[in-house]
Image (cartoon, grey):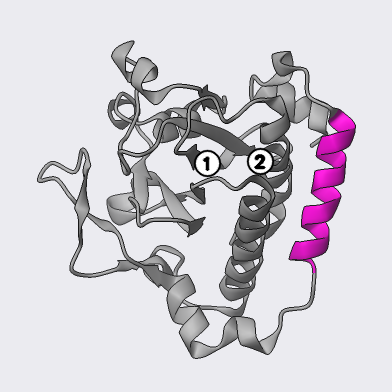
Amino acid sequence: MTISDYLKRSALDANGFNLAAIDRARESLQAVASRPIAEAEVTANALDLFYSYPVPELSANGSCSLVHTLARAPYDLAQALGGRSARNTESLVRLHRLINQVQAMTGVGWMGIYQARRVAAGQRALVKLAYYGAPSRAEFPLNPDFARLSNNSTVGLTGRACIIGDVSLHTCEGNPFYVCDARVQSEACLPILNEFGETLGIIDAESFEQNTFGSGMLVPFIAFALEAPAYLP
């Protein structure tokens, strides 16, 4: 998918992006992701961290995270992906590289990449594959009911980006927002699209300051969204 096509399909085309800057960011991310995988990246300890991670306890009805209480058991990403495999491992290694690179480029407080997958009972959800920052919810159901609570689910269903400059104002106006960390004051949630415009997942980035995600700040995240389909498990 071209940069212009992505911006149009994701409803970001009105923001006046520097296409050459996005292209340069893509090249930088490609260079990081395509390096041969080193032994240190696939040690037993590293793989354990890739395939499971801590998550907050959920409320009784599953509608929100109990931010200061971790669930007793970590999330089993291996189960969600159908087990550990060479292909899954390679995808996770390269996605973690991209997460770390984009975070280093932007300095955001939290970011993660989610893939739309079938989970329990065949339901569709956004499954968190890799992230930087504090523990957060692992799955966001992809259905209209949960989209009323979550901008992540909304973007996953619509394929249209959601840029929030002021979380307090956004929620006061009745817009969906799922709180995993009360420190978050602005957010950018971008769809991951295939060549046909179908939504494969999302990239979510959060800042502890308001109005973080202007057009210049979004460049690495757009580049990440364009590169991500090549590395999904």
Q: Position of residue 220 (x, y in %)?
A: 71, 42
Quick one: label 2, few (<14), some, or many (20+) residues within 10 Å? many
In the rendered image, residue 23 lying in the magenta stretch gets the answer yes
Q: Position of residue 49 (x, y in %)?
A: 44, 75
In the rendered image, the vertical position of residue 187 relative to residue 92, given as above or below: above
Segment tinted magenta in the rendering: 19-34
Q: Which mark is residue 41?
A: none
Quick one: label 1, few (<14), some, or many (20+) residues within 10 Å? many
Which is nearer the eye, 140 or 142?
Answer: 140
Whether residue 151 is visible? yes
In the rendered image, residue 72 lying in the magenta stretch gets the answer no
Q: Disc 2 marks which residue? A: 221
Q: Disc 1 marks which residue? A: 205
Quadrant holding the C terminus: bottom right
Amino acid at circle 1: Ala
Amino acid at circle 2: Phe
Q: Residue furthest right?
A: 20
In the picture, residue 98 is in which quadrant? bottom right
Quadrant holding the N terminus: top right
Which is nearer the eye, 148 or 32?
Answer: 32
Q: Residue furthest top?
A: 173
107 to the left or right of 181: right
Q: Secondary structure at mark 2?
A: helix
For image coordinates 58% across by 35% down, the residue present is 191
Q: Position of residue 8 (x, y in %)?
A: 72, 20
In the rendered image, the vertical position of residue 45 relative to residue 56, given as above or below: below
For the residues bearing labels 1 and 2, Cβ distance under 8 angstroms: yes
139 to the left or right of 45: left
Q: Position of residue 148 (x, y in %)?
A: 31, 23
In the rendered image, the vertical position of residue 108 relative to residue 154, given as above or below: below
